[in-house]
Image (cartoon, rainbow, N blue to C red):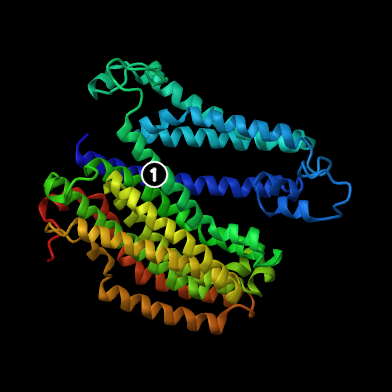
Amino acid sequence: MGSEDVLKSASTLASYNVLLQVMFRVLTFLLNAFTLRFVSKELIGVVNVREAFRRACLSGEGAGRNWRQAPDPESIPHYVPAVGLFCLSALTELLAEPLWVLAHAHMFVRLKVIAESLAMIAKCLVTVVMVVSAPQWGLYIFSAAQCVYAGFLLLCYVLYFVRFLGSEEAEKKLFPVSRITELLPSRVDHEPLLNWKLTTLTWSFFKQSFLKQILTEGERYVMTFLNVLNFGDQGVYDIINNLGSMVARFLFLPIEESFYVFFAKVLERGRDVRHQKQEEVSMAAEVLECLLKLVLLIGLIITVFGYAYSHLALDIYGGELLSSGAGPALLRCYSCYVLLLAINGVTECFVFAAMSKEEVDRYNLVMLGLSASFLLLSYWLTWMLGGVGFILANCCNMALRIAHSIVYIHRYFLQSEYTPLWGLRPHFAVIIALGVSSVLTACSESIFCCDGGWLLRLVHIAVGAVCLLERAGKAAPSIFSKVRSGSETAFNKPSQRK
């Protein structure tokens, strides 16, 4: 597959992933709203492994309780067999992993979209039917639905590859596998049992994933073990965190996953830029610059408009419960954090695609230090500032990760004529436009929002819509088109600004 085809497939995959994320979130939202009418919120909490589990264990008297079991079988029936079914679904989904990797590596975009869509729809249908017909089954409903999801996912991949492998299309593409049985564990003649180069690289990425989990979910560990926030504040923070991270999950994560595949295929891991194919380096630099411009623009828009519309959004979403306390301040801080998430996603997807195994190991040591400092900073800032401290600690952590990635990218292209980091320098006109928009929307919030009724709220919304469409809307289409056609501009006019 040529570089231009890889770029086109990566762009298409990113677009489809965004649509998939939106569809999944909408379906999940509607499903939760529907099931809450038939089952208890405690049951939903246990399924989602949320705060309800700890609260159930801590409530009531401890005398006579069997502490080896949780939660109470009378409150949450069928817990043990349901956990077994969830484990079975995880194993079933794991069986599909080799096929998923094979499809992802060869850019089978439609297969991923169709398989995950059908599996999600089947899961939702099973949940709805069982909730309506047999709500007394409790956790069996959700564990069975998860098994159906995993089964459909595996079935779609197996059926596709059974049909595809050995076909004329596979032979034309010189596909490396001819029978699905070749994907089963086996010993290849004259080959070692394990590819030690890939094994050590996998181990390095595994350690990195563990450390990233601490950096991503570290505030939850601090909340759980140190009790720096009461349950009410934890609940508000959890809602704000879910709302604020929607854009990151919908848009930035699909971009990161799809273009990681692009960079990994275009660039040779661990090789100096001078020893790479220069047309591939040119394309990678151009696409990286365009992606940085795109996510920077989106992040700045979210930061600017998030400040003026956080209070209104929470008031509409959760009423006075969310908008009267620390909720608006938390969401405003999270709007700034989204900007850092956007930049970090793109820079790290390039860095991880270009790093050698030794560089990944060195970066793991950096992440180990970041993890320890992040946990300490989270505790200290939260003790001083409450929930806002968690977000500020995340901002500091993300800023340090961005700084590391920027240094790596600068060194990577230092011996070449390309400067993709120029994508992080917004045009002066964009800064002026967003600055004016921030002033106008802030004034609009102070005048029209949010105690004057719906008419004044609509006026406030209209002011933001006009600012967004007139000022920011002019820049986005050109950047989107530039990302999609980056291959042409990369070969015609490389990014040379030294």
> Residue 350's x, y, as percent?
29, 51
- Which sits in the foreground, 12 or 175? 175
Residue nearer the viewer, 105 or 275: 275
Residue 295 lies left or right of residue 330; in this view the side is left
Residue at image position (41%, 28%) is: 99
Q: Report if residue 311 is visible in the image.
A: no
x and y, in percent, of residue 197 in the image? 30, 34
Above or below, 442 against 242 in this view is below
Residue 431 visible at all: yes
For the point 37% across and 31% down, which residue is it?
Answer: 103
Residue 103 against residue 232 in the figure, above or below:
above
| Residue at the disc numbered 1 | 205
Report x, y in % for residue 412: 20, 55
Q: What is the x, y in percent for residue 300?
A: 38, 69
Q: Quadrant of residue 136?
A: top right
Q: Quadrant of the C terminus?
A: bottom left
48 is higher (above) or lower (below) than 84: below
Please state if 350 lies on the left or on the right of 254 as rendered.
left
Identify which residue is drawn at 42% across, 51% down.
253
